[in-house]
Image: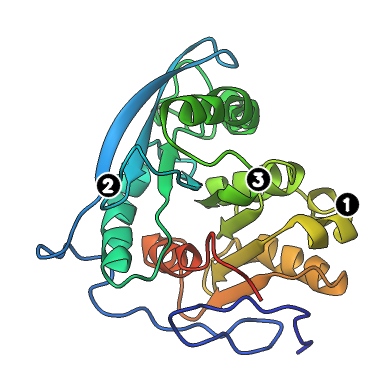
Amino acid sequence: MKLLRLIFLFTTILPFVCSGQSAVLPVPAGFDILQENIPHGKIDTIVYHSKTVGSDRRALVYTPPGYSPDNKYPVLYLFHGIGGDEKEWFNQGKPQLILDNLYAENKVEPMLVVLPNGRAMKDDRATGNIMAPDKVEAFATFEQDLLNDLIPYIEKDYPVLTNRENRALAGLSMGGGQSLNFGLGNLDTFAWVGGFSSAPNTKAPEELVPDPELAKKQLKLLWVSCGDNDGLIGFSQRTHDYLEAHNVPHIYQVIPGGYHDFKVWKQNLYQFSQLLFKPVD
């Protein structure tokens, strides 16, 4: 296996093995379980007006334990899959519990997490034929809603840092494809990008990273991961192969026994979040 040119290190757990594919570290028991005796963050629903869509839209916002409007925070935008909406991560992935537990162990930087609806259309519910062309197209349209409507709303209404080094995005399946497409396509806006089991909407690698040298300079972290039993693994593999061939620093993780499900995605979030907004080696 070719050596990675650059390895991102966990600051509080064992480092990755220096190889083309990062070693998969086990997640601890109870990492996603409610712990009653620790401080907890808060989840709010927001409504923002989308000029892109021409309607009001909803998103969830997680604020960390000890949140104060007197502080400034980086932001992670976390995307759902084709069959979900802004509540999919909240209901099935439990990011609020994963992060609360990590905060209790001082393993993550304080950050806001925004859970948007990535289906940018007026009727954005995950109902009927979720594979209908207009609904699939709405996931691409969300790029403009994110950049022109949602991010400005968050930066106006919350005490957040507004430079690219303090914005991250990640997502699962369709949302993983969105994260790679939008993040790598807007390196002036995002420095931290994660694709979890990215779906067929993921652009071809040469479209994602047409200028590898620019990507090397601007990316803080690029994370690509998938379960080895996932039928969509080819999209992650081809992205990794291209990045490795062009010496673009990234973490590529194939999870043994992993399928296209939240068991994989929760593990991705647990590990990815610990690297965000910290110095990288």
- Whether tag 1 and tag 3 are in contact, CB under 8 A, the answer is no
Judging by the rendered image, the residue that carries numbered circle 3 is 164
Given the current orientation, which residue lies at the most extreme front position? 70
Judging by the rendered image, the residue that carries numbered circle 2 is 91
Dot 2: element: helix
Note whether residue 87 is visible. Answer: no
Q: Residue at x 50, y 30 (%)?
A: 155
Q: Residue at x 74, y 42 (%)?
A: 188
35 up-or-down from 58: above or below: below
Q: Of 238 and 87, which appears nearest the observer?
A: 87
The percent coordinates of residue 40 (x first, y second) are: 20, 54
The percent coordinates of residue 43 (x first, y second) are: 27, 41
Instruction: Say which quarter of the image contains residue 95.
Output: bottom left
Disc on the earlier residue, 1 or 3: 3
193 up-or-down from 163: above or below: below
Is 2 placed left or right of 25 in the picture?
right
The percent coordinates of residue 91 (x first, y second) are: 27, 47
Is 47 placed left or right of 165 in the picture?
left
Q: Of 89 and 49, which appears nearest the observer?
A: 49
Disc on the earlier residue, 2 or 1: 2
Marks 2 and 1, how far apart at CA = 37 Å
